[in-house]
Image (cartoon, helix red, strand yellow):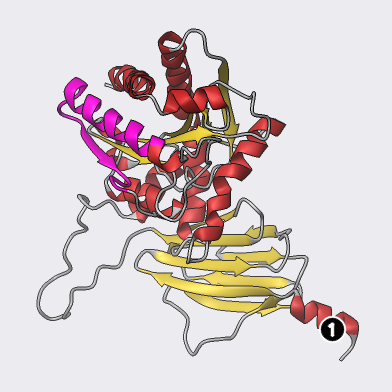
Amino acid sequence: MSELLFLSIFAAIGLNLFPRHDGAVVELIGQRVLEPVVRASGNTLRIDFNEPVEWLETASLPIWIDRLTADSSGLTIEFDLLIASADWALSGDSMVMIVFARAEEEILLPPVAWQAPPAPPDTSLWSDSLVFAALERGEGSPWLVDFDCIVVDPGHGGRDPGAVGRSGSREKDRTLEISLMVRDLLRIRLPELRVVLTRTVDEYVSLGARTRMANRNRADLFVSIHCNAAVNRSANGFETYFLSRARTDDARAVQMLENNVLELDEISTVPEDPLSFLLADMAQSIFQNQSSHLAGAIQSSFSHAFPVRRDRGVKRAGFYVLRGAYMPAVLVEVGFISNPEEEQGLKSLDFRFKAAQAIVESIVEYAERES
């Protein structure tokens, strides 16, 4: 076998096909960064890559696809006329590409076909297809009409202690204490609001499971609470992030710090449902303004609560814990646990209560603005 052929096989792009009740998802996983060129003509989609595509043909294709062929330079998909649109997205590291072919209407089959006509879709349990349809139109998720639920996410937990201060204070403990206060204060300020915590005890919750919990609860906001850390122990202050590409070295450093927990996940970081890649990318742009506004409100509240502390401003970064949230989402760094002075503050009940109050005030302002 020649070296060139060996490299070609090693670098082949793997293809997975996921039939659905409302279309089909094609997942392409590369050994290196993908460079797709997509061309659409009628009901045919052609995708050329920088590597060959490897696919083990199955006996039959789903109803939505008439023909799918993979070759040394890409793949060609011929869709059935039932398919209304085909969209695609790349993962953040450009190693995975998702193509979602969506039908005009869902196919609803009862458990036994002769028992009864198909049941209408249950819109009380919003499917990702309904979310996709809304996001595709540039609208928010279907449940965001009423501001009635928020998910508060205490960062880290269990086998993931987060950052640890010089005197041994653990980020996972401080974030849980502040989050519990946020929950209790919100119940007083907004008694009609349902507040869900991703964890209420010292347990490990994967980053992907946190936003899935927010989506499952049809939350209107997702707020992740963390403590900052830096090699420079004099670094101090508070900052709030929303999901976007990091623009500064500081933001990239914090992004790397918070995303490092992915190494502890026992499952692949690629979402179980590949469609979530596509939804996440669409949601990121649609909710960016609202997330940015909430981040600014949180910074303003912290400035009033802690006038002598440094306001580090609103920043953007690609936090994995925010990716996949189908609602406005922010990540709050309440202080530097690596700074001895701020670590002592974080160990103080008064400091944590003021931080929780500041977060609650910003949420109340956001709720009033949205109502």
Left or right side of 29 for 241: left
Identity of the amino acid at label 1?
A: Leu
Using the image as rendered, state which of residue 220 and residue 155 is in the foreground: 155
User: What residue is drawn where x is 66% and y is 60%?
Assistant: 95
| Residue 311 placement (x, y as % from top left) | 55, 16
User: How far across and down, in percent of the image, does residue 307 sit?
Assistant: 48, 8
Q: Is residue 131 magenta?
A: no
Asked if residue 327 shows in the view, the reply is no
Q: Quadrant of the N terminus?
A: bottom right
Q: SS of the residue at dot 1?
A: helix
Which region is colored magenta? 174-201
Is residue 187 shown left or right of residue 296?
left
The image quarter in which residue 306 lies: top left
Q: Residue at x 53, y 22 (%)?
A: 341
When the figure is inspected, residue 91 is found, relative to residue 358, above or below; the finding is below
Closer to us: 280 or 75: 280
Quadrant in which residue 119 is drawn: bottom left
Residue tagged 1: 5
Query: With 230 as the anchor, is 126 left or right in this view?
Result: left
The answer to whether residue 111 is visible is yes
Q: In percent of the image, x 66 and y 38: which residue is there?
A: 253
Count of labels shown?
A: 1
The x, y position of residue 125, in whole percent, is 23, 53
Tell me where residue 371 appears, x and y as whole percent.
26, 21
Vertical position of residue 276 compared to residue 20: above or below: above
